[in-house]
Amino acid sequence: NCGMIYIHPQPTPEEIVQMYSKEYFEGDFRCGHEGSYFDDATLDRLADESLLLRIKEFKPEGKFLEIGCAGGAFLNAAHKLGYSVEGVEFSDEAAQFARTKFSLDVHTGDLKDASLPSDTYDVVFMGDVLEHLPSPADTLREIHRVMNHGGILVIECPMQTNTMFSRFGFLLYQLIGKKARVHLPPYHLFEYRPGSLRRLIEQCGLRVVHKAEFIIP
């Protein structure tokens, strides 16, 4: 009754490690729409200054934590706009790239592995990350712990609207007697509706202060 779509059975921890190897960032990240993460042109596109300026309207300065920061392009842009930045990245290759390319402080592993201090961060950002997490509620509770009083959490993630377009495409194939298969690892472990995402956030001790904007690709 929660209104979420999820992978069953979930991949094992070992399978998740294999999925996010260097090859993922060279072709599959963001569903293959961005090319290789390690190209300079891609890095420029991912340094989304317009989004950061919107974040600054809510929290203009302070400590900025990005969870799933990949190779650090967005985190580096936040640093250039005056934030004190820190990152967490599951992929060892991507985390090392962020440290080498941008001299960023990036922890390898998941958020709990980082053992960050409580009541510390003014902005926590997750861009296209929540849908990849095997334990999203645990991560959100840990975010609540490390956030400063009055801090904000900013989440970007696909809604099930995206999935509806895929289903429509599969239906068309069925109508003409053909089968369509997607040969991709199960990167998205959960997909949310606006209501289910709000309930999840609130159950983890947070509250929504700004409604999401929905973009249909």
Image (spheres, rainbow, N blue to C red):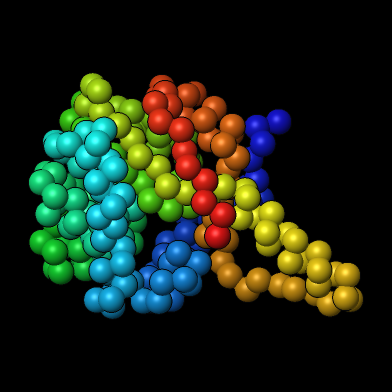
Q: Position of residue 188 (x, y in %)?
A: 54, 55
Among the 4 quarters of the image, the one containing residue 77: bottom left
Picture quarter with the C terminus: bottom right
Residue 93 in view (yes/no): no
Q: Does residue 77 appear to the left or right of 24 in the view shown?
A: left
x 47%, y 42%: residue: 213
Name the side, left or right, on which 160 lies relative to 120: right
Viewer-side residue, 89 vs 149? 149
Q: Please report the residue visible at 30 percent of the width from the left and 32 percent of the height from the top.
A: 152
> Measured along the vertical axis of the image, is residue 136 above or below residue 72?
above
Count of numbered labels shown in the rendering: 0
Q: Residue 91: x, y in percent?
A: 33, 62
Asked whether 203 or 196 is in front, the reply is: 196
Residue 14, position as x, y percentages in the image: 47, 60
Residue 65 in which image quadrant: top left
Residue 13 vs 126, above or below: the answer is below
Tell me which residue sits at (31%, 49%) in the image: 51
**Image quarter hosting the N terminus:** top right
Residue in view at x 57 percent, y 37 percent: 194
Visible residue check, residue 57? yes
Who is closer to the viewer here, 114 or 204? 204
Q: Is residue 80 left or right of residue 192?
A: left
Q: Would you place residue 145 above or below residue 24 in this image?
A: above
Q: Position of residue 19 (x, y in %)?
A: 47, 66
